[in-house]
Image: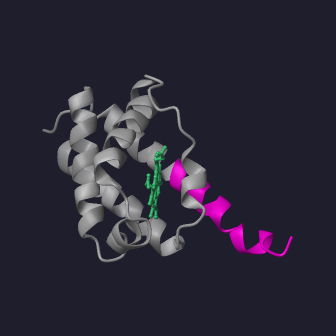
Amino acid sequence: MLPDLTTEEDIRCLVDSFYNRVDQDELLGPVFNGFAHVNWASHLPAMYDFWSSVLFGTSRYKGRPFPKHIPLPIGAAHFQRWLQLFNQTVDAHFSGPTATDAKARALSIATLFEHRLSHRSSLNIL
Ligand code: HEM
């Protein structure tokens, strides 16, 4: 029986384990490391704040995540992989209402991002 996500330490565990998978993934790794040259030392703490705000309502995250994704070379396959890795990470460590909530929130945000990004090319002619 796995524990639910309840503490900030749990959030750090989730985020660290997830981006460890992303970093090594052959589809997503090159986007983060090659295209975006992500500074993991600052990206990971931003993601602790983001997930703490989403799941625990701490309001620590003050940014606007969507614009950072506009220049990225990503589409449906990337979002599918992102969600697969996220769900696998949650299920490997946690189980319970907040773990279920984390997967539901990830799905709805990913769906929204993917939908908004799909309009990038049609806006180019305007
Ligand atoms: C294929 C899917 C995705 C890719 C490749 C991707 C990639 C990235 C990259 C490269 C950054 C910029 C890091 C930086 O330079 O600071 C970023 C930031 C971020 N992403 Fe994603 N992302 C994806 C999906 C998502 C989803 C589904 C969520 C939310 C559930 C999300 C939440 C964020 C947040 C909160 C930031 C931080 C923005 C900030 O620094 O304020 N991303 N992402």
The percent position of residue 96, horizontal first and vertical second, equals: 28, 35
Q: Is residue 23 above or below residue 87?
A: below
Viewer-side residue, 48 vs 110: 48
Magenta segment, prevailing SS (helix, strand or loop): helix
Q: Please state if 47 lies on the left or on the right of 110 as rendered.
A: left
The percent position of residue 99, horizontal first and vertical second, equals: 32, 39
Residue at left 55%, top 55%? 68
Q: Please state if 38 lies on the left or on the right of 118 as rendered.
A: left
Q: Quadrant of residue 24?
A: bottom left
Residue 79 visible in rendering: yes
Q: Quadrant of residue 49?
A: top left
Tag count: 0
Q: Was residue 102 drawn as part of the magenta stretch in this picture?
A: no
Residue 95 visible in rendering: no
Residue at left 45%, top 48%? 106
Residue at left 21%, top 41%? 13
The percent position of residue 114, horizontal first and vertical second, equals: 58, 62
The percent position of residue 78, horizontal first and vertical second, equals: 45, 70
Q: Is residue 48 above or below residue 44?
A: above
Q: Please state if 62 lies on the left or on the right of 42 as rendered.
A: right
Q: Quadrant of the N terminus?
A: top left
Viewer-side residue, 9 vs 106: 9
Viewer-side residue, 31 vs 114: 31
User: Which residues fall within the magenta stretch?
Assistant: 109-126
Q: Quadrant of residue 50?
A: top left
